[in-house]
Image (spheres, rainbow, N blue to C red):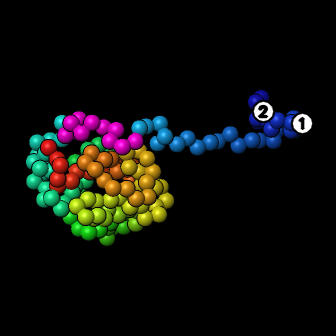
Amino acid sequence: MSSAPKTPGDGGEGQQVDLTSTIHLSSLRSVRNQRNIEEIFSALSGEEREIIAALPRTSAMLLVLAGPNKGARFLINDESTSIGRDASSAICLDDVTVSRKHAEIVRDGDNYQILDLGSLNGTYLNSQPTSRERLVVGDEIHIGKYRLTYFSGKGNS
C-alpha cells in the first residue's frame, strides 16, 4: 500500500501536498530571429517565394510553414488586421487555444507590429511572450497552436 506524500513536520498524518509546478518552455529557446533567414526561404516552395517577392512595399504576409493549416497564407495590407477565433476576424484561427479577439497586426509607418489584445493564452514572438513588438522578416508568431511566419513586402530576397 502506498502512502501520500507528507508535509515536512506533519507528524505523519498523511496530508497531501500539491506537487505540481509550471514550466515555462519559452525561456529555453533563444529570442529574436532564432532561425536563419536563408533556411526559412529555402523551406518555401517556388510559388511561395514568387508570391512574397511580388508583395507591394506596404504589404506583408503571414505563412503557416508547419502545424495546423500548413500552407495557409494571410495577406496583411490594412492599417489593422484582426486575428482571433471570431469568424469576423480578418485572420480566423478556429481553435479553443485562440481567444475570440486574440491579437492584431497594426501598421506603423512602413512596418507592422503585433499587438496582443489581452488574450487568455498570450501571443508569442519567436517563443517569447509579447504584448507589442515590431515584426521583422522571419519572425514566428505563435497564437494558440498556430505558428505563422512573417514576411514583408520589402527586404525579402
Residue 150 vs residue 95: left or right? left
Residue 12 vs residue 86: left or right? right
Q: Name the residue located 15 percent from the left edge and 50 percent from the top edge.
A: 52
Q: CA distance from mark 2 to mark 1?
A: 14 Å
Q: Is residue 98 visible?
A: no
Residue at the disc numbered 2: 3
For the record, the magenta segment spans 31-41
Please, is residue 18 above or below residue 144 in the view? above
Q: Position of residue 140 (x, y in %)?
A: 32, 47
Residue 121 vs residue 9: left or right? left
Q: Position of residue 14 (x, y in %)?
A: 82, 38
Residue 155 vs residue 17: left or right? left
**What residue type is disc 1 on?**
Gly
Please, is residue 1 above or below residue 70 in the view? above
Residue at the disc numbered 1: 11
Q: The C terminus is located in which quarter?
A: top left
